[in-house]
Image (cartoon, rainbow, N blue to C red):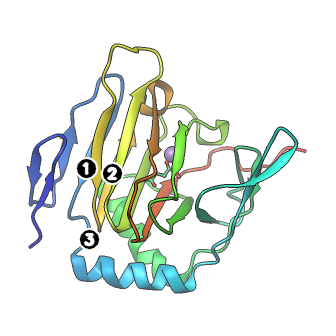
Amino acid sequence: MRFAKDPVLDLFDDSANGVALPIVDGQLHYFPNAFTEAEADALMQRCLTELPWRQDHINIAAKSIPIPRLQCWLGDPDAHYSYSNIALSPQPWPEFLLPIKARIETLCAHSFNSALANYYRDGTDSVDWHSDDEQELGENAVIASLSLGTSRVFELKHRYKSSLQTLKTTLSHGSVLIMKGSTQQNWRHRIAKVKHLDEARINFTFRKILRKKVEG
Ligand SMILES: O=C(O)CCC(=O)C(=O)O
Ligand SMILES: [Mn+2]
């Protein structure tokens, strides 16, 4: 069995039960060993080669800027979503992801109808500070974040209490982090760029879209 240690929060866990990470104004639960190393290795390979990765762009000051990662949106046919003005129509769930989704739903005791997959090709790829608080997700959204590949540091910063320290936790290969309660209303999160990192990481955030129609 793998033994995961979080270097920042100094928490150990080698059980299937995971650990509650200490946070105010939100709830975080981390399962370092949600998937075995062999399962996570196999899944990473299939995701790299079989998912329909795309390069999206955002418009800043009338310029189209490529976002620093590849992504794809997977989900039930009616789970439309928009993110930073990028409208995402879901790609159908690949067969190989269905048992993964089912395992995560059991772990969270919650069902999901979509997932945003991010492919960080190396340390120059990142996601900037944001909350997963889009209207489509409703209040107190449950979001399950599956990490594969090289470990990256996940940071959380309180939106209103500037005296609170930024929290940092390492998300390792095969782990699942559940964010729930008022986490998205009160905290922003990011994956910062890292120097001298050549290895790839894939992350899925499983979500439940409540309002399924796209406007306009
Ligand atoms: O890669 C991660 O761990 C986080 C991704 C994320 O925050 C998102 O897709 O909204
Ligand atoms: Mn996010």
Q: Residue at x 76, y 45 (%)?
A: 85
Neighbour class for label 1 at 10 Å: few (<14), some, many (≥20)? many
Q: State whether residue 54 is above or below residue 50.
A: above
Quadrant of the image for the N terminus? bottom left
Q: State whether residue 207 is above or below residue 90.
A: above
Q: Earlier in the sequence, mark 1 or mark 2?
A: 1
Q: Is mark 1 within 8 Å of ligand 1?
A: no
Neighbour class for label 3 at 10 Å: few (<14), some, many (≥20)? many
Element type at mark 3: loop
Compare residues 35 and 95 and report the one nearer the observer: 35
Residue 178's x, y, as percent?
Answer: 35, 48
Q: State whether residue 128 is above or below residue 116.
A: above
Q: Which residue matches tag 2?
A: 177
Q: Is mark 3 within 8 Å of ligand 1?
A: no
Q: Which residue matches tag 3?
A: 35
Left or right, 97 with respect to 61, comes to: left
How far apart are labels 1 and 3 at the CA level?
Answer: 12 Å
Residue type pointed to by label 2: Leu
